[in-house]
Structure formats: structure tokens, C-alpha cells
Image (cartoon, rainbow, N blue to C red):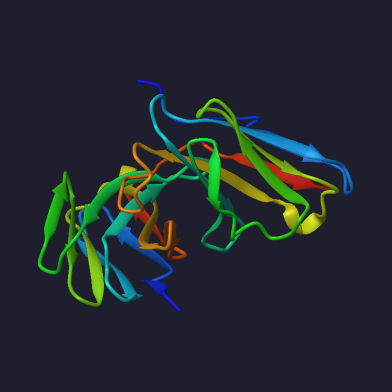
Amino acid sequence: GAGVSQSPSNKVTEKGKDVELRCDPISGHTALYWYRQSLGQGLEFLIYFQGNSAPDKSGLPSDRFSAERTGGSVSTLTIQRTQQEDSAVYLCASSLVGSVTDTQYFGPGTRLTVL
Amino acid sequence: EDQVTQSPEALRLQEGESSSLNCSYTVSGLRGLFWYRQDPGKGPEFLFTLYSAGEEKEKERLKATLTKKESFLHITAPKPEDSATYLCAVPRGSTLTFGKGTMLLVSP
């Protein structure tokens, strides 16, 4: 079956512009996670959705970052007024039931470059 | 604070040369330990979950083991296609805390 998909695969933007990153989870998966992976760094948790609600937003680095999920499916991560330090690969993962011990399946990521 | 440390950071092997990767963790009440493989330009691919000390799981040339303080990923007679970054992670709160990974390169 289809895995997690993300779009775009690559995004180059200018400092100060807003960007939207999209994630389509595996069909039927109730939990969705966003992570950020910078060069030389591990995966950094950003936000977790259970259905359309986000019970854990603790990893969002600033109020320039926001995310929503609609219909219990697609999620969008929005970064406003992008900065060069936002450059990273943004990864989305989904899991079936949302327990932290449930396997998370990752998408291919969106590589964001802020010039 | 819960931490996950992987070693070595990078490992270069000849094809057929077996070795082990280490993942040590400090977490109270371990609820599982996950191993993933990540190829360049791709997202992490799930390999194994281990839940209790003494547990072992195998997949092709890979075997993962777990003790109370660390996990090992043993690679037996590796092939060039095993070259990748291997990540381990433990549950923390509502998500996973990942180590920085071990980059494995297997030369023919």
C-alpha cells in the first residue's frame, strides 16, 4: 500500500518568506508527527497530532512555526518569515493508533533551503 | 533528561567484515527501543522494536539485541547495500527521542 508522502520534495525560499509543507499519512493512521533533521543533528521532534488535535506542540521552535491537520488525514506545517536557521529536512511520520510505542513510518521528507 | 547516544559516529567495513553498532540510553521505565535505517535523501525506514532486556530480533544480516542500558545492532557479513545511517530511538512523552546515528559504509 501507499506509504507516507510529502510535498514538495525540495523547497528553496528567500529569507522572510512563508512556506507550507504538506504531509499525507498512511491511510487509517490516526497519529501524525513532524520532525526536523539538520545536518549533523539527530531528528528533532516538532509536533504530534492525534486525529485533528495536537496534544503535544512542545517541539515547535518559535511562534513562526504552526501546523494543522484536517479530516484526520493531511497535515500542513507552516513556517512564517523564514530564517536561514530554518534550513533543514522536515520529516513527517504516521502511526496507526498514536501510542508512543507504536511504530512510526516516515515519509521521504522535504528539504527546505532558506537563502 | 532522557538521552540516546550512538557509537561509533561512522564505521567503515569491508564486505563480509562483521561488526556491531551501539546505542546506549538513559531513560526511566523503558517502553521500547526502535532501530531505523536511513539512506541518503530518504526518510528513516523501520527495522526493529525491542521491548525488554534479553530480547533479540533478526532480519537478514541484521540482529538487534537489548540490555537494560544499551542495544546493539549486529551486522553479519555485510554487503555494500547495507551502507546507510542507522538510527536508534526511545519513547519519551508522546514521541521518540533519536540518537544522532551511525553512518555505515561497506566497501566491496
Residue A108 is situated, as x and y percent measured from the top left of the image, at 51, 36
Quadrant placement of the N terminus of chain B: bottom left
* Residue in the picture at 74% in, 59% down: A62
Q: Is residue B1 above or below residue A78?
A: below
Residue B54 is situated, as x and y percent measured from the top left of the image, at 10, 67
* Residue in the picture at 81% in, 46% down: A80
Q: Residue furthest top?
A: A1
Place residue B72 in its image quadrant. bottom left
Q: Is residue B76 above or below residue A21?
A: below
- In the image, B70 versus A33, the foreground residue is A33
Place residue A71 in its image quadrant. top right
* Residue in the picture at 72% in, 50% down: A65
Indicate left or right for A19 with A70 as reference: right
Indicate left or right for A16 with B68 as reference: right
Place residue B5 in its image quadrant. bottom left
Residue B86 is situated, as x and y percent measured from the top left of the image, at 37, 56
- In the image, B19 versus A35, the foreground residue is A35
* Residue in the picture at 31% in, 76% down: B28
Residue B46 is situated, as x and y percent measured from the top left of the image, at 33, 45
Q: How many marks?
A: 0
